[in-house]
Image: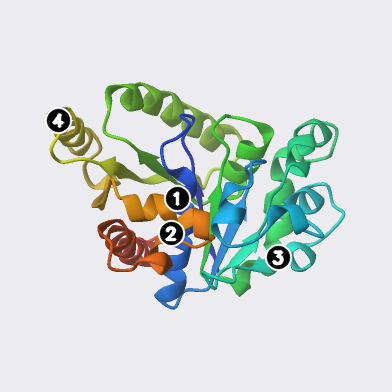
Amino acid sequence: MAKIFCVANQKGGVGKTTTCVNLAAALQLAGQRTLLIDLDPQGNATMGSGIDKRGLKASIYQLLVGLEDLAGVCVTSPTGGYDVLPANRDLAGAEVELVDLEQREKRLRNALAPFDADYDFVLIDCPPSLSMLTLNGLCCANGVIIPMQCEYYALEGLSDLVNTIKKVHANLNRDLKIIGLLRVMFDPRMTLQQQVSAQLEGHFGDKVFRAIVPRNVRLAEAPSHGMPGVVFDRAAKGAQAYMAFAREMIERARTF
């Protein structure tokens, strides 16, 4: 039975896509059957996995509106080895179309159900807003991974996200819970970042992952080559951090 995780944060530019792509590749390298779902119309996770979003015959848009099943949309990442449900600009139109469809917030959940036994991990890259697409991701997930920078504004946005997750848990998905907070783009030389990190650990305890992803140029370069950072340069500090994060996820999933 697949463990389904949303990587979500309502704040943009916090490393959601980088986390999704690198965690998917790291889990695949660790022998886990992994599916990455790109729910962002920008299609960055698709491109970062080495898949050209402009040349897609079908995308997750067709899956959500019922024109294709998972097998008809799924593509294997040529650089990461994991499966991808890719996205392109068509997905922006799904927002409007989903409003009139039955069980609109459970379209993704229903589409994934028949393929549950095919994967160990399913990761969902959500857009940076609480949209119908994000709601579809939250409704089919077992838990939420929250990547965040150790900055003041990130703390402000975190409380909004936690409230959103509580509402979805209460009304739409009783299985949903916060799996953990991942500190990304971390610079230990900055006192503020160390203070915020300590605050997170004090408030959330073991919900804060032990792995910390540092600011890393090699991670930033990898998407331009269509490769996850853990494949592009496995010796880089950022890649090592995501490999450690993958091991931590596998460990937590056993007690899920």
Q: Which residue bears the numbered disc 3?
A: 74
Distance between mark 3 and mark 1 Cα atoms = 20 Å
Whether the residues at callouts 2 and 1 have beta carbons within 8 Å, the answer is yes
Closer to the chain start, of discs 4 and 2, is 2
Distance between mark 2 and mark 1 Cα atoms = 6 Å
Distance between mark 3 and mark 2 Cα atoms = 18 Å
Q: Residue at x 74, y 47 (%)?
A: 107
For the residue carrying disc 1, how many other residues have a C-alpha within 10 Å: few (<14), some (14-19), or many (20+)? many
Where residue 161 appears, as percent x and y from the top left, is 45, 29
Q: Residue at x 17, y 27 (%)?
A: 192
Outermost residue toward the bottom in this view: 31
Q: Which residue bears the numbered disc 1?
A: 18
Q: Is residue 4 visible?
A: no
User: What secondary structure is marked by label 2?
Assistant: helix
User: What secondary structure is marked by label 4?
Assistant: helix
Choose top left, top right, bottom left or bottom right for residue 49. bottom right
Q: Is residue 201 visible?
A: yes
Q: What amino acid does circle 3 point to? A: Cys
Q: What amino acid does circle 2 point to? A: Asn
Which quarter of the figure is the C terminus placed in?
A: bottom left
Where residue 126 appears, as percent x and y from the top left, is 56, 42
Q: Residue at x 47, y 72 (%)?
A: 28
For the residue carrying disc 2, how many other residues have a C-alpha within 10 Å: few (<14), some (14-19), or many (20+)? many
> Which disc is residue 22 wearing?
2
> Of discs 3 and 1, which sits in the foreground?
1
> Of discs 3 and 2, which sits in the foreground?
2
